[in-house]
Image: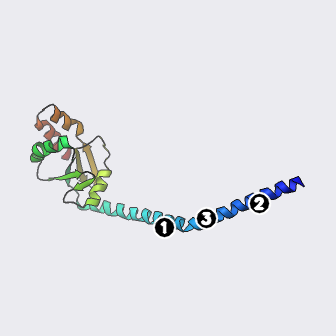
Amino acid sequence: MITRQINFKSWLTMGSLFLIGLGLFLLFSPLLFLFILIAIYSYFDNITFNKKYKEYLLTIDGTNFFCYNNRANSKDFIEKNILPTLTPDIKVIYLDGKTPKSEYDQGFISKALYSISDRKGFPYLLKISDGQLFDKSINNDFYNTMNQNKDIGQLSKKINSFYQ
């Protein structure tokens, strides 16, 4: 008799849990379905964007970029001392917070900046060659030049040698 009561209670508990679980599943299944659709869309959208990005790199092949950010202690120094020394073929990308400002497509330039492999800090030198992005951080050289009042000519030589 006692085993029947325990057996009945366990079946009742399991049945209740099953019904609650089924109810929750039915309640949240539209959200789950929506989440799956969004994940599938994002996956294919990312594939499409990466294909367009690679095509874009081919269209701007041979372009050189100098990229700096809005860090207060370096922005003025760069604009007064570095930018005037750059050759006209070097395009400037100014990163205002997380927003790149340049004459190029913002989405693709953002992708290029997020793809930087030499993550040592701004400023960065970028060049596109054969549809590939090459990058170099000149952070250490730049801050040594700025903080120790070193000759800007040495930094300019390093910048120009990267683009050769």
Q: Is residue 43 visible?
A: yes
Relative to 161, residue 148 above or below: above
Marks 1 and 3, Cα distance to the nearest angstrom?
Answer: 17 Å
Marks 3 and 2, Cα distance to the nearest angstrom?
Answer: 20 Å
14 left or right of 76 in image: right
- The amino acid sitting under disc 3 is Phe
28 left or right of 3 in image: left
Judged from this view, the residue extending furthest toward the top is 148
Which image quadrant for residue 152? Answer: top left
Point out residue 89 in the picture as x, y percentages from the top left corner.
14, 53
Marks 1 and 2, Cα distance to the nearest angstrom?
Answer: 37 Å
Q: Is residue 131 visible?
A: no
Q: Which residue is disc 3 drawn over?
A: 25
Q: How is the image coloured?
A: rainbow
Q: Which residue is disc 2 drawn over?
A: 12
What secondary structure is found at the residue carrying circle 2?
A: helix
Judged from this view, the residue extending furthest toward the right is 1
User: How many residues crowd around disc 2 within 10 Å: few (fewer than 14), some, or many (20 or more)?
Assistant: few
- The amino acid sitting under disc 1 is Leu
Say whether disc 1 or disc 3 marks the residue closer to the N-terminus: 3
Q: Pick whichever, 146 or 64, lies toward us.
A: 146
77 left or right of 121 in image: left
- The amino acid sitting under disc 2 is Leu
Q: Please identify the quadrant where the N terminus is shown.
A: bottom right
- Comparing labels 1 and 2, the label whose residue is closer to the camera: 2
- Comparing labels 1 and 3, the label whose residue is closer to the camera: 3
- Comparing labels 3 and 2, the label whose residue is closer to the camera: 2
Q: Which residue is disc 1 drawn over?
A: 37
Residue 122, disc: none
What secondary structure is found at the residue carrying circle 1?
A: helix
Point out residue 55 in the picture as x, y percentages from the top left corner.
30, 62
**Residue at left offset 32%, top offset 64%:** 52
